[in-house]
Amino acid sequence: MTSNEYKTLNNDQLASVSLKIAVLTVSDSRSETEDRSGQYLKQVVQNVGHELIDYALLKDDVYQIRAQVSQWIADAKVQVVLITGGTGFTGRDSTPEAVSVLFDKEVTGFGELFRQISYEQIGTATIQSRATAGFANATVIFCLPGSTHACQTAWEHIIQSQLDARNKPCNFVKHLSRCDKNSVAK
């Protein structure tokens, strides 16, 4: 969909814009059955009408994370990547380091807004979150803390509306819709 085509859609057509989303859980301690945060993200993605394209659970290893995300951003079918886990300060937390080098553009406001909202819920503990987001090869990537509550906060207060084509005055859908992955300059 081009930018001009996007501008001509009415509200009903905008409501039907479904994005293709991959979910990655980064954890040294969880199995798929214990992955409440990843399960939460998979569920809410589908509940609002987006398509879950893929899911992976990886150990907190910078190169495995980077390889998986690189594979997804190279896949023209994947428009959004949601990552939960690995954003803290323990020795193996490495999601921001693994992913930020892939960003063509960082969405600096995401981390700032996430921490502002989290402050109202958990106080100054929010400074220990290194939540971040960015665009890489026409794919938007969100790196979230591993707690289900943090994923819920990010989804309900930020991500869901930014992945809704009806959200005004702006949203990420229009950027994803007009991006042709094969023509993105590096």
Image (cartoon, rainbow, N blue to C red):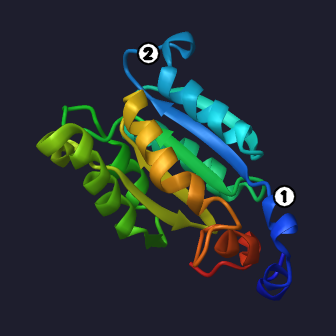
Q: Amino acid at mark 2?
A: Arg
**Camera-nearest residue between 166 and 125:** 166
Residue 37, above or below 69: above
Counting residues from the start of the chain, the first of labels 2 and 1 encountered is: 1
Of the 4 image quadrants, the one containing the N terminus is: bottom right
User: Dot 2: few (<14), some (14–19), or many (≥20) neighbours within 10 Å?
Assistant: some
Considering only vertical position in the picture, is 66 above or below 141? above
Q: Quadrant of the C terminus?
A: bottom right
In-front residue for pair 176/45: 45
- Mark 2 secondary-structure assignment: loop
The numbered disc on residue 174 is: none
Residue 146 seen by the camera? no
Is residue 135 in view from this perspective?
A: yes
Say which of marks 2 and 1 sits in front: 1
Judged from the image, the secondary structure of the residue bearing numbered disc 1 is: loop
Point out residue 162 in the picture as x, y percentages from the top left corner.
Answer: 57, 62
Amino acid type assigned to the residue bearing label 1 in the image:
Ser
Residue at image coords 39%, 59%: 100
Most extreme residue toward the left is 124
* Residue 151: quarter of image: top left
User: Percent from the top left, x then y, of residue 99?
Assistant: 43, 53
* Picture disc at residue 16: 1
Q: How many marks?
A: 2
Q: Residue at x 62, y 81 (%)?
A: 185
Find out whether the residues at labels 2 and 1 contact each other: C-beta distance under 8 Å: no
Q: Residue at x 37, y 15 (%)?
A: 29
Q: Residue at x 26, y 40 (%)?
A: 121
**Left or right: residue 158 compared with residue 52:** left
Residue 177, picture quadrant: bottom right
Task: Indicate whether 120 appears above or below 175.
Answer: above
- From the image, tell me which residue sits under label 2: 30
